[in-house]
Image: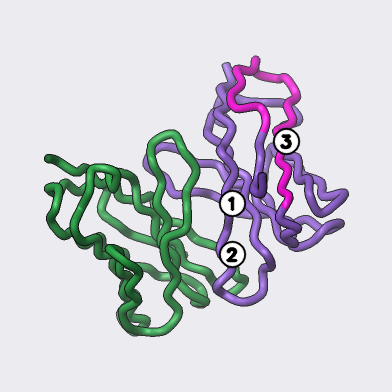
Chain colours: A purple, B green
């Protein structure tokens, strides 16, 4: 099935623990993104990747890291989770980043609670 | 700074028409997107405008005025399944999307 998958669907995590959120797409899209969505706020970009092998920082990158070893996978790692990282995390992809009309396709999201 | 403003919540009646407004101030402009997001689900693409004017797609239309930094999403013949949040996002000078907080649309029978 074409699209983006994320794992886990939800997770409760103790503060200070390390956690990796997984994201895989099978559309052969060049660009991938990680967002967090909090009540009352718009989606905020954490990190992005324009193509395999490259990554960049978004609006709220602190406390998060990413890697893009291949086209399909774009994991997001919280090195030492804190309660303020409680959020819903969405992974997205688009065919490219140049050109304004690049529709982003979203995964189903991961609901993360840090206690 | 960059800013996208849209109403927090709107209520409309089944079968009616509703207009959801979005105003923006961004560093550069490479188009404006509207997405729909049902509760607990991922956002899905509705429309894209880069030139001034109205784009119609079935029951949904989207309008853009670049000189006014303004867009609206028009939903006609409202159905209960249209109850969702509607997200406005602007592609800035770096082709990054800047997102509004979303407008929660409640449809009443």
> Is residue A23 one of those drawn in magenta?
yes
Is disc 3 in contact with disc 1, using a CB cutoff of under 8 Å? no
Q: Residue at x 37, y 41 (%)?
A: A40
Q: Give a yes or no on whether discs 3 and 2 share a subunit.
A: no
Secondary structure under the numbered disc 2 in the rendered image: loop
Q: Which residue is mark 2?
A: B96
Q: Which residue is mark 3?
A: A22
Among the 4 quarters of the image, the one containing residue A10: top right
Instruction: Please count the marks in the image.
Output: 3
Secondary structure under the numbered disc 3 in the rendered image: strand
Magenta-colored span: A7-26
Q: Is residue B43 left or right of residue B8?
A: right
Q: Please provide percent x and percent y for residue A2.
A: 66, 49
Q: Please provide percent x and percent y for residue A95.
A: 68, 65
Label drawn at residue A25 = none
> Is residue A13 one of those drawn in magenta?
yes
Mark 2 is surrounded, within 10 Å at the Cα level, by few (under 14), some (14 to 19) or many (20 or more) other residues, namely: some
Q: Which residue is mark 1?
A: A45
Q: Secondary structure of the magenta portion, mostly?
A: strand
- Return the disc, 3 or 1, that comes first in the chain's sequence: 3
- Chain on which label 3 sits: A
Does residue A36 appear anywhere in the picture?
yes
Q: Residue at x 59, y 21 (%)?
A: A114
Is disc 2 in contact with disc 1, using a CB cutoff of under 8 Å? yes
The residues bearing labels 3 and 2 have C-alpha atoms spaced at a distance of: 22 Å
């Amino acid at each position: 099935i074409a699209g983006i998958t994320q794992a886990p669907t939800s997770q409760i995590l103790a503060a200070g623990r390390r956690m990796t959120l997984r994201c895989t797409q099978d559309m052969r899209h060049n660009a991938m993104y990680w967002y967090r969505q909090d009540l009352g706020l718009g989606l905020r970009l954490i990190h992005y990747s324009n193509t395999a092998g490259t990554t960049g920082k978004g609006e709220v990158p602190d406390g998060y890291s990413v890697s893009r070893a291949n086209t399909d996978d774009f994991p997001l790692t919280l090195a030492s989770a804190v309660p303020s990282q409680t959020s819903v995390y969405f992974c997205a992809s688009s065919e490219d980043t140049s050109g304004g009309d690049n529709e982003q396709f979203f995964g189903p999201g991961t609901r993360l609670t840090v206690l | 700074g960059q800013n996208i403003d849209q109403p927090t919540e709107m209520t409309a009646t089944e079968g009616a028409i509703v207009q959801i407004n979005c105003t923006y101030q961004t560093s550069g402009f490479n188009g404006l997107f509207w997405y729909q997001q049902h509760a607990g689900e991922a956002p899905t693409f509705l429309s894209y405008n880069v030139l001034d004017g109205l784009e119609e797609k079935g029951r949904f239309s989207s309008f853009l005025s670049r000189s006014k930094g303004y867009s609206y999403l028009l939903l006609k013949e409202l159905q209960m399944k249209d109850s969702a949040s509607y997200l406005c996002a602007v592609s800035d000078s770096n082709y990054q999307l800047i997102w509004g907080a979303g407008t929660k649309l409640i449809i009443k029978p």
